């Protein structure tokens, strides 16, 4: 149940100076749609909140696309599309991938992002940024990072994007077209019965979005957003996003969408589900405790008592690894020392960044597959 808290920061972030005059625009008009997109383009994450949501990935391919992908990789064991196929087959067999996500956000220089994988296997990967210092935490390892010069793949900015974009989608809804201005509103139409639709096109003509809903006494109620791709002057429906469970003024100064479901073109098979769990004002004491760097046998506010045995410190530019032994003693190693073998360092590097690399490989496989489908 969403906590019924009045969030002035949402009002300031979404309906502030950039929204001046929007109340004078006719709801559902072309000018109104343009104003919503401009407001979305200027959206900035507000300060001082705690946001929890969950995500499910059900399918990334239709049955026909999966069959085509299998045929494409036949007799090619090193084909990159095999990663996408493997993930798709696993989701079909045991159900969707499930994640629980949470961000405690003071400001852009002080936040903690917690990501818990619920299925197929339970694991977690957290990151915190506190000014020039940052740290990451998994069940097996903790890493300390100099945020001003992080190792490749450890950039706080990339993790920050992972929570900013979903929050923006919940707040902005179907008017989120990113920060680019390469889009134009072609038209916006309201029928006598209140049915409403608007067409937004990328300026190069490759993609067209159709927003649909209803105009009533309370303004515009969004139903869904359809994405079409243009190939050889023919429009083909690619996906549908349905927006629902929009809050009221009882929850927020400006309502947000609490549930977004992505469908395949048939409107029946689900791709993804994103759902808000809770939003609340950030408690300073909770934030202070959540930002405490992990230490051996310490109690983390989010994860409880830590059983982490390996701590990697990247802050000096050269990784220093501290292992906590069974008897509580510690052993420190510097893999780049002349006494350290390259093979030993190689093992430790993969252990240090394994969960990031593994996720990257899967995402890369899916990305390559999607790119081929759009080619």
Image: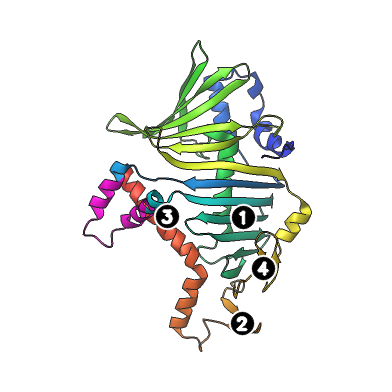
Disc 4 vs disc 2: Cβ atoms closer than 8 Å?
Answer: no
Per the rendering, the mark at residue 326 is: 2
- Tag 1, which secondary structure? strand
Instruction: List the residue tagged with mark 1.
Output: 113
Q: Earlier in the sequence, mark 1 or mark 4?
A: 1
- Residue 357 % position (x, y): 45, 64
Q: CA distance from mark 1 to mark 2?
A: 30 Å
Q: Earlier in the sequence, mark 1 or mark 2?
A: 1
Q: Earlier in the sequence, mark 4 or mark 3?
A: 4
Q: Please identify, in this view, whether the residue under mark 1 or under mark 2 is nearer the observer.
A: 2
Q: Earlier in the sequence, mark 4 or mark 2?
A: 4
**Badge 1 local density, few (<14 within 10 Å), some, or many (20+)?**
many
- Tag 2, which secondary structure? loop
- Would residue 185 be visible to someone looking at this image? yes
Position of the N terminus, as image quadrant, is: top right
- Tag 3, which secondary structure? helix
- Tag 4, which secondary structure? loop
**Badge 4 local density, few (<14 within 10 Å), some, or many (20+)?**
many
Q: Which residues are magenta?
A: 66-89
């Amino acid at each position: 149940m969403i906590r019924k808290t009045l969030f002035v920061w949402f009002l300031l972030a979404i309906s502030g100076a950039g929204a001046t005059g929007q109340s004078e625009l006719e709801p559902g008009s072309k000018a109104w749609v343009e104003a919503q997109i401009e407001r979305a383009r200027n959206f900035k994450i507000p300060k001082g909140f705690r946001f929890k949501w969950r995500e499910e990935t059900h399918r990334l391919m239709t049955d026909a696309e999966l069959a085509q992908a299998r045929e494409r990789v036949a007799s090619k064991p090193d084909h990159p599309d095999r990663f996408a196929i493997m993930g798709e087959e696993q989701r079909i067999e045991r159900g969707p991938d499930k994640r629980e996500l949470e961000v405690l956000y003071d400001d852009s220089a002080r936040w903690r992002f917690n990501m818990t994988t619920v299925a197929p296997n339970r694991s977690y990967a957290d990151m915190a940024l506190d000014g020039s210092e940052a740290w990451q935490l998994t069940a097996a390892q903790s890493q300390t990072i100099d945020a001003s010069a992080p190792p490749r793949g450890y950039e706080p900015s990339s993790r920050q994007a992972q929570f900013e974009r979903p929050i923006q989608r919940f707040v902005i809804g179907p008017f989120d077209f990113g920060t680019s201005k390469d889009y134009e509103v072609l038209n916006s139409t309201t029928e006598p019965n209140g049915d409403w639709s608007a067409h937004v096109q990328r300026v190069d003509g490759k993609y067209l979005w159709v927003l649909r809903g209803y105009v009533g006494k309370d303004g515009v109620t969004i139903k869904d957003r359809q994405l079409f791709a243009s190939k050889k002057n023919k429009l083909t429906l690619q996906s549908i996003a349905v927006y629902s469970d929009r809050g009221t003024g009882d929850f927020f100064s400006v309502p947000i969408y609490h549930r977004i479901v992505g469908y395949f073109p048939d409107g029946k098979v689900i791709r993804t589900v994103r759902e808000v769990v809770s939003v609340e004002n950030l408690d300073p004491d909770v934030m202070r405790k959540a930002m405490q760097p992990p230490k051996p046998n310490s109690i983390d506010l989010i994860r409880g008592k830590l059983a982490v045995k390996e701590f990697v410190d990247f802050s000096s530019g050269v990784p220093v690894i501290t292992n906590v032994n069974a008897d509580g003693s510690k052993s420190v190693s510097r893999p780049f020392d002349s006494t350290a073998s390259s093979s030993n360092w190689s093992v430790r590097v993969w252990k240090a960044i394994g969960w990031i690399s593994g996720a990257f490989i899967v995402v890369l496989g899916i990305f390559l597959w999607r790119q081929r489908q759009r080619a």
